[in-house]
Image (tube, grey):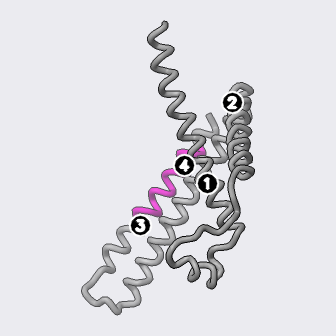
Amino acid sequence: MKFVKITNIMLWVFLGISVFLAISLLSNLNENQQDPTMDTWVNVNLYWSYILFFLSIGSALVLEFINTASDKKATKSALTAILFLGAVIGLSYILSDGSIPKFYGVEKFIEDGTLTTNVSKWIGTGLIATYILSALSIIGIVWSSISRIFK
């Protein structure tokens, strides 16, 4: 109960700050695009939205981690999913080829250093992982349909 009360207070404080910043921005808007006051309020509102965005992501991750760690079944399923994803990426990395592909204009990417054998290997890893996961999802969809028929 205490956690809910603290969360509600934090949300009301965030809402109050957001309303204050929005009103301040709206009251300082004018036609003069060179006005430094208007630019300052626009920047402050942008930074505030970044802060809120990263706080929401961070709190969602932390709270989900706490929830998962407190439930053994959820922890087991989360670890299974992470291990499965690691196995798919590992298999994809083993199967991928690190050679640089031949296509029109490849020399430009090789010369400026954006395309190396390591980059090519990770691109291949991403493609093969996508193929594996797509095939598994198609198999899962088909299996779900077929198993429903037999039930």
Camera-side residue of 60 and 1: 60
Residue pictured at 68% horizontal, 54% vertical: 96
Q: Which amino acid type is shown beneath numbered disc 3?
A: Phe
Q: Which residue is mark 2?
A: 77
Residue 20 is tagged as: 3
Badge 3 vs badge 4, beta-carbon distance below 8 Å? no
Q: Nearer the viewer, residue 41 or 63?
A: 63
For marks 3 and 4 on the same chain, the one whose residue lies earlier in the sequence: 4
- Which SS class for mark 1? helix
Label 4 CA crowd tier, 10 Å (few <14, some 14–19, many 20+): few
Q: CA distance from mark 1 to mark 2?
A: 24 Å
How far is mark 4 from mark 2, CA to CA? 33 Å
Q: Quadrant of the N terminus?
A: top right
Q: Is residue 76 left or right of residue 114?
A: right
Left or right: where does residue 20 sit relative to residue 76?
left
Badge 3 marks a residue whose secondary structure is helix
**Mark 1 or mark 2: whose residue is earlier in sequence:** 2
Q: Nearer the viewer, residue 58 or 141?
A: 141
